[in-house]
Image (tube, coloured by chain):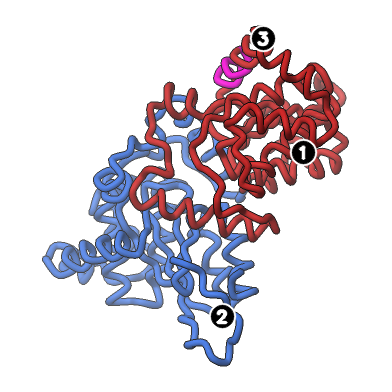
Chain colours: A blue, B red
Amino acid sequence: MIAEMNNSPANEAPTDPTIEFFFDFISPFGWFAAEQIGALANRFDRQVNWRPFLLRVTVGAIMKATPPLELPLKGPYLLHDIKRSARYYGLSFSESARFGFNSVSAARAVRWARSSSPRHAGDLALALYRAHWSSGRDISDMEIVLNVIDDIGLPRDDAARALAGPKIKDAFRKDVESAVELGVFGSPTFVVDGELFWGVDRLPMLETWLEKGGW
Amino acid sequence: MIAEMNNSPANEAPTDPTIEFFFDFISPFGWFAAEQIGALANRFDRQVNWRPFLLRVTVGAIMKATPPLELPLKGPYLLHDIKRSARYYGLSFSESARFGFNSVSAARAVRWARSSSPRHAGDLALALYRAHWSSGRDISDMEIVLNVIDDIGLPRDDAARALAGPKIKDAFRKDVESAVELGVFGSPTFVVDGELFWGVDRLPMLETWLEKGGW
């Protein structure tokens, strides 16, 4: 993860034009990032690779850390900060949105979209995020996930079949392992040219990295 | 901690012109914030109240959380991010700077300066931060703290006497309790008009809060 200084661009291997965007649907900060990452990528003529993963694997199983919202002092602050940040970003946060739900169905749906409708994976991720956190629809429920797929014009029945089978489940499980291997632990995390940036607050730093090629 | 919307300024109680700046010397992110908070306060014609506290009380004793640098995945990321952030902010980070040291002597020194040389409390805090993180001097050592006090022209002998006695120790202990009562858990934290912002990455949000009076 050491930054490679872009000292002699002509001699460097071509940079990967993708921004790897890691997120978990249970993370409202991931939503705030999802709302902004497309426009940022466009500014730099890059694609976004939408890569859901599971915080319960990284924070829960590997780091064995208490979910932050459950901590004294920090938990109440985060709840307040999430709502304040939603307003800051101009987003409407539903009072009935459920925290700490099981995000695996929604995550697998994005994994399915990446294979079957790659140009719409981001649209689906955003639609799922908004359904849950802005509209208060429970995306832990596969039926709701399939409804959202249908809402944005993707093939619901194809998705239902694929999501019931083993292939997408295996593919997503490998995705989570790959995220861990890359060092991803939190949502959102952005990876460009091997460099990780954790947190929606780091979008400005990510932009500077893209502008300057590192420092 | 609910934000008070500044809807009718003429009817509001006058806002406190102070930015409460909470930090622990063991936190490099606190250093990065310390380097910027003075200029930010000047832009808004506010004073900074430099309030050291102890992460081992908030994160350790109250939240009972593992120090982040010791966590798998997150620990290595934070170490990399601290050095990258130092470069980002144009600061020179010493390769021999010690992590996780006992910051109570340095914290009490700033508490002493707040009483005895209030206009220089910030100067001392910055000098201590730079001594440790940029020059690799160990500010867990009271001798080093007293040398830094002397370096910036404050009265070393007065400090030595005060820091050996019970008054400053009591005052600082109460400071840490006050921080906890306010809801402070991390370093840096900025509090304006009762509103908390945690993290050096939130300096832009703090500025927006000061410009708009909240949202």
A187 lies left or right of A9: left
Label 1 is placed on what type of residue? Leu
- Magenta region, mostly helix, strand or loop? helix
Where residue B63 appears, as percent x and y from the top left, is 41, 26
**Up/down of B12 relative to B209, above or below:** above
Residue at disc 3, secondary structure: loop
Q: Which residue is mark 1?
A: B210
Instruction: Residue lying at the far top in this picture: please name it.
Output: B166
Q: CA distance from mark 1 to mark 2?
A: 34 Å
The stretch in magenta equals B174-181
To which chain does the residue with label 3 belong? B
Where residue A91 appears, as percent x and y from the top left, is 56, 49
**Up/down of A110 relative to B86, above or below:** below
Q: Residue at x 44, y 60 (%)?
A: A126
Q: Which residue is mark 3?
A: B165
Q: Which residue is mark 2?
A: A45
